[in-house]
Image: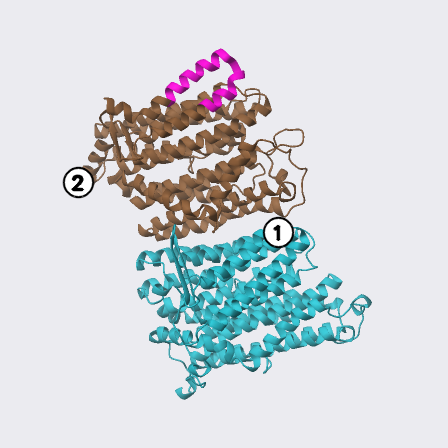
Chain colours: A brown, B cyan
């Protein structure tokens, strides 16, 4: 029991911090918002320190319900780091709006607990509980600017569609349980293994369960055709919340999907691979084509995230240790690029201090704010996967895994669709560098945010190359935990 | 360590990189000087490299391996072919900087930084010995070139920059998948090892096509050449020089380095494709060039036609063809670069590229007209200029493999003479109908130095091509030996005595 509790120490730390900070917030009011924010960031750091599976191989607790392995460790570190960074960004942004409330960091903390449980789940019900905890916090966050119609609409839309997806997922889980007699990943995998080995093949009920479970999770990672909510929610939600949505929960959901597909449904790889391939190609194509006409930078980044998830799914389709490792590597680099871009978007305020979101507002940024423009250009080229920027390497490994798994055609089609995506990333660079300057943005004096942007820009530049090997070793170790 | 005793190739890459970074932090006029000094220092290093290159020595020289750097290995090394293309790059760069001295007035620091970054990436392409490192340099060049065309280009620059970027990107991403497959198959990313790996014949076709997609766009071959006229016309003068002078050579270099030695069977099997497209390119683009009214567009189309001579020669599977193709690449790099500079010189004065706006320039600009004449003749392929050597050898090579191809390609020489002389006639001779054109001053010292230095190189290559062919001879021999097994039978009835290199062995020149 003690071992099990030790394994879940990060979740315990985050939950206790959330409850304590909630009390602080309740008594001290919104004046304490900044203090609560930094305490929450500290809690994430503390939780990251106690993540099992970093120094050793970790283990499983609560009779296999909760896994503290290296896979969970890798995902948790990325999730906690990105949650903490989006929290730091939120503080300064909301303070400028004068709408910051002390509940915000608490909600992010609770969401962090949920994400931790998602990536550690060894059981279908734990998976569901974690997912719901994360989602409920996210629904509230989306509508955090209560007086803003768009924000309220985003929250409602997210909630309704999220509830639908949860229902689909739960239905899938119930089918899986009904046809395998267990909710434990390992037991489910065993039964699927027996069935695929038998002459009759996979039973229809199990197949349905598998499809529904994948569909429910596809909603969470916003893979096409379950992506519809993403642009609206990303546009409507306050920008720091969007930054959060695009980073930490994406990593957690992707890790969850990967673990479920590989650990629980591993023997049925042939069956789910077709679904994953379809989602991957549909996401890369639609994420590329639909982004072209966008005029709002947040909407554009929403499609960019759909596009990127598509590429990560190609790694999952390989269903090999290399493939899983490439998915994790992809998500880690993706998070840096996305957070970097959103940090730049957070800086977009006109001279009156009002936030602006149109792409046209970026016009001529290279002359009014050359450093920010250079950083943004690097994020864009990197997201487009142009070497020698960092964003090339995750794509590289994903395609490498696909080629090694005899899915060369998938790699070829996938990489060809990446050219569509390159077009709209180029468009941002074009607006910033080729167009005549628009009115300059307000000068920001927030050095923490500036420092974060600089760090992200350095990471995506060739200077970040020495980090590839350590991250890759970690992700390969993490992937090893699933096989 | 290599024969230099220090990592000379890394130094060659580092100098422009450091210069470029420096440019961003100084004033506009200082940035020009920094860029010029950096490129000249690099050129001096290049001259040293040429002097110390052992002709007939080891195949890969100045090799350096600084260990695994993440997903790829920092492995550099050059053979004679790479050496010559590196020298071409190094030679053209200071000229490009000089050409932009007064023409570029806005955002000079960024412009110089882009150019120097470009130089690093181009040299990197030619000396990378790890195939992923090669890809990194190959693709990385897109970013600075995109910015150069988009920021400092002409009126239609945005369209041209997109077209350039997306065309070349689509071509090269397919190559990446092929590279991944090859590395997966061979278990190594080292180019020298891959060069001697025999890939299964049925896979070769697909791999060849994937590489072809990339190199044909870069080259560019008909019908994927359409990005080139747009990019050339809209790019600033120096951008056009680099595009025509070096970037197009990456396509030819790719064929010679990868497609031929790695997939000999596929190369022979798909010979019809290369030869067919080249024949169309020679005739079609020459005819298109004939009716152009924009000088830069005319030269751009002539580039496509000249590049077809390269592909014809490369896939002739014999010594003359390959030698010829390589010399055409070098010669075209010099000549088309010089022609774009010639256009730039008068564009700077009158701000139009319309041919009809000029006329009779030989009266008021005699020095200009003389040099322009030299480069026109070199482009036509007059004996005594670099253009003749390469085109002649390519055609001799091609004749052995297919008389039809040789016959059709030869019409390109006639057509080439037609459009170039027609251009020269309209610009330099005739009545001076436009008063503003008649009032233009002749070349100043800077322009004279730029064009004069290229002129000397063109004549050198025309009169004594041996200096340039000697370092490449052994590598061409290795390549021939490698593709010998797939060599298609030709239809020409010539005795093989002519097919042996008539020159004495390379040892004589060491």
**Residues drawn in magenta:** A14-39
Chain under label 2? A
Q: Quadrant of residue B372?
A: bottom right
Residue A117: % across, % down: 34, 27
Tell me the crowding category of disc 1: few under 14, some 14 to 19, or many 20 or more residues within 10 angstroms, Cα based: many
Q: Nearer the viewer, mark 1 or mark 2?
A: 1
In space, the residues marked 1 and 2 are separated at their CA atoms by: 66 Å
Q: Extreme top residue here?
A: A27
**Position above or below: A250 against A30:** below
- Residue B172 horizontal side relative to residue A313, left or right: right
**Can residue A135 be seen?**
no
Residue at label 1? B110
| Residue occupying the point 35% across, 73% down | B482
Tell me the crowding category of disc 2: few under 14, some 14 to 19, or many 20 or more residues within 10 angstroms, Cα based: few
Chain under label 1? B
Disc number placed over residue A198 in the picture, else none:
2
**Can residue B448 be seen?**
yes
């Amino acid at each position: 029991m003690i071992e099990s509790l030790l394994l879940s120490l990060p979740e315990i730390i985050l939950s206790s911090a959330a409850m304590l900070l909630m009390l602080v917030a309740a008594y001290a009011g919104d004046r304490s918002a900044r203090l609560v924010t930094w305490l929450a960031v500290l809690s994430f750091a503390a939780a990251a320190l106690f993540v099992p599976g970093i120094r050793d191989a970790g283990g499983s607790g609560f009779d296999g319900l909760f896994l503290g392995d290296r896979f969970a460790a890798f995902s948790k570190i990325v999730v906690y780091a990105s949650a903490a960074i989006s929290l730091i960004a939120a503080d300064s942004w909301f303070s400028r709006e004068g709408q910051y409330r002390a509940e915000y960091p608490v909600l992010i903390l609770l969401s962090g607990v949920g994400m931790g449980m998602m990536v550690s789940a060894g059981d279908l019900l734990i998976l569901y509980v974690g997912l719901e905890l994360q989602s409920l916090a996210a629904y509230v966050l989306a509508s955090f600017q209560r007086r803003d119609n768009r924000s309220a609409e985003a929250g409602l839309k997210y909630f309704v569609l999220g509830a639908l997806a949860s229902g689909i997922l739960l239905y899938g889980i119930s089918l899986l349980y009904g046809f395998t007699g267990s909710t434990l990943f390992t037991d489910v995998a065993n039964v699927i293994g027996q069935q695929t080995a038998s002459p009759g093949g996979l039973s229809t009920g199990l197949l349905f369960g598998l499809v529904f479970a994948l569909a429910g999770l596809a909603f969470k990672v916003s893979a096409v055709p379950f992506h519809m909510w993403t642009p609206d929610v990303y546009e409507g939600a306050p920008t720091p919340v969007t930054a959060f949505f695009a980073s930490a929960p994406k990593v957690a959901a992707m890790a969850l999907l990967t673990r479920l597909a590989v650990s629980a449904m591993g023997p049925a790889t042939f069956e789910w691979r077709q679904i994953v391939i379809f989602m991957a190609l549909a996401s890369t194509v639609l994420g590329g084509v639909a982004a072209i006409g966008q005029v709002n930078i947040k909407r554009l980044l929403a499609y960019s995230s759909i596009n990127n998830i598509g590429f990560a799914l190609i790694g999952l389709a390989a269903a090999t240790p290399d493939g899983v490792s490439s998915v994790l590597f992809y998500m880690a680099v993706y998070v840096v690029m996305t957070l970097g871009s959103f940090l730049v978007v957070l800086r977009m305020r006109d001279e009156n201090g009002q936030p602006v979101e149109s792409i046209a507002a970026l016009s001529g940024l290279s002359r009014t704010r050359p450093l920010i423009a250079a950083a943004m250009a690097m994020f864009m080229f990197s997201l487009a996967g142009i070497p020698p920027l960092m964003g090339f390497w995750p794509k590289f490994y994903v395609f490498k895994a696909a080629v090694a798994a005899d899915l060369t055609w998938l790699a070829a089609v996938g990489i060809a669709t990446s050219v569509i995506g390159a077009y709209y990333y180029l468009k941002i660079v074009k607006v910033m560098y080729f167009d005549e300057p628009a009115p300059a943005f307000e000068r920001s004096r927030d050095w923490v945010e500036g420092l974060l942007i600089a760090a992200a820009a350095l990471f995506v530049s060739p200077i970040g190359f020495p980090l590839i090997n350590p991250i890759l070793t970690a992700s390969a170790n993490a992937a090893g935990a699933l096989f | 360590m290599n024969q230099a005793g220090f990592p000379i190739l890394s130094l060659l890459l580092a100098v422009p990189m450091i210069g470029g970074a420096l440019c961003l932090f100084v004033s506009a006029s200082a940035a020009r000087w920094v860029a010029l000094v950096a490129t000249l220092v690099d050129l001096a290093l290049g001259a040293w490299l040429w002097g110390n290159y052992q002709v007939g020595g080891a195949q890969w020289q100045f090799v350096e391996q600084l260990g695994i750097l993440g997903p790829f290995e920092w492995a550099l090394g050059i053979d004679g072919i790479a050496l010559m293309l590196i020298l071409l790059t190094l030679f053209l760069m200071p000229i490009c900087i000089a050409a932009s001295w007064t023409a570029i007035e806005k955002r000079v620091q960024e412009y110089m930084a882009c150019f120097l970054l470009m130089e690093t990436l181009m040299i990197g392409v030619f000396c990378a010995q790890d195939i992923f490192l090669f890809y990194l340099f190959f693709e990385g060049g897109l970013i600075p070139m995109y910015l150069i065309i988009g920021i400092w280009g002409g009126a239609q620059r945005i369209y041209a920059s997109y077209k350039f970027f997306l065309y070349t990107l689509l071509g090269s991403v397919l190559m990446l998948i092929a590279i991944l497959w090859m590395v997966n198959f061979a278990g190594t990313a080292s180019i020298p090892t891959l060069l001697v790996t025999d890939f299964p014949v049925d896979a070769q076709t697909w791999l060849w096509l994937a590489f072809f997609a990339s190199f044909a766009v870069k080259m560019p071959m008909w019908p994927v050449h359409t990005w080139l006229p747009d990019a050339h016309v809209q790019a600033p003068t120096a951008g056009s020089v680099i595009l025509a002078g070096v970037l197009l050579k990456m396509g030819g270099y790719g064929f010679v380095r990868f497609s031929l030695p790695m997939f000999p069977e596929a190369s022979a099997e798909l010979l019809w494709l290369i030869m067919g497209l080249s024949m169309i390119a020679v005739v079609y683009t020459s005819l298109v060039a004939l009716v152009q009214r924009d000088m830069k567009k005319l030269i751009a189309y002539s580039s496509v036609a000249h590049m077809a001579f390269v592909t014809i020669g490369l896939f002739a599977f014999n010594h003359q063809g390959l030698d010829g193709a390589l010399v055409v690449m070098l010669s075209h790099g010099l000549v088309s670069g010089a022609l774009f500079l010639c256009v730039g010189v008068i564009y700077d004065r009158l701000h139009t590229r319309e041919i009809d706006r000029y006329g009779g320039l030989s009266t008021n600009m005699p020095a200009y007209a003389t040099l322009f004449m030299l480069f026109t003749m070199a482009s036509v392929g007059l004996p005594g200029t670099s253009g003749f050597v390469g085109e002649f050898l390519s055609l001799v090579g091609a004749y052995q493999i297919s008389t039809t191809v040789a016959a059709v390609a030869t019409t390109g020489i006639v057509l080439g003479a037609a459009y170039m002389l027609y251009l020269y006639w309209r610009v330099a001779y005739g009545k001076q109908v436009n008063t503003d054109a008649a009032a233009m001053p002749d070349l100043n010292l800077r322009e004279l130095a730029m064009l004069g230095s290229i002129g000397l190189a063109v004549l050198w290559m025309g009169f004594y091509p041996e200096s340039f062919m000697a370092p490449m001879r052994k590598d061409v021999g290795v390549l021939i030996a490698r593709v010998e097994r797939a060599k298609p039978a030709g239809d020409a009835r010539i005795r093989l005595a002519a097919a042996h290199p008539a020159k004495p062995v390379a040892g004589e020149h060491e």
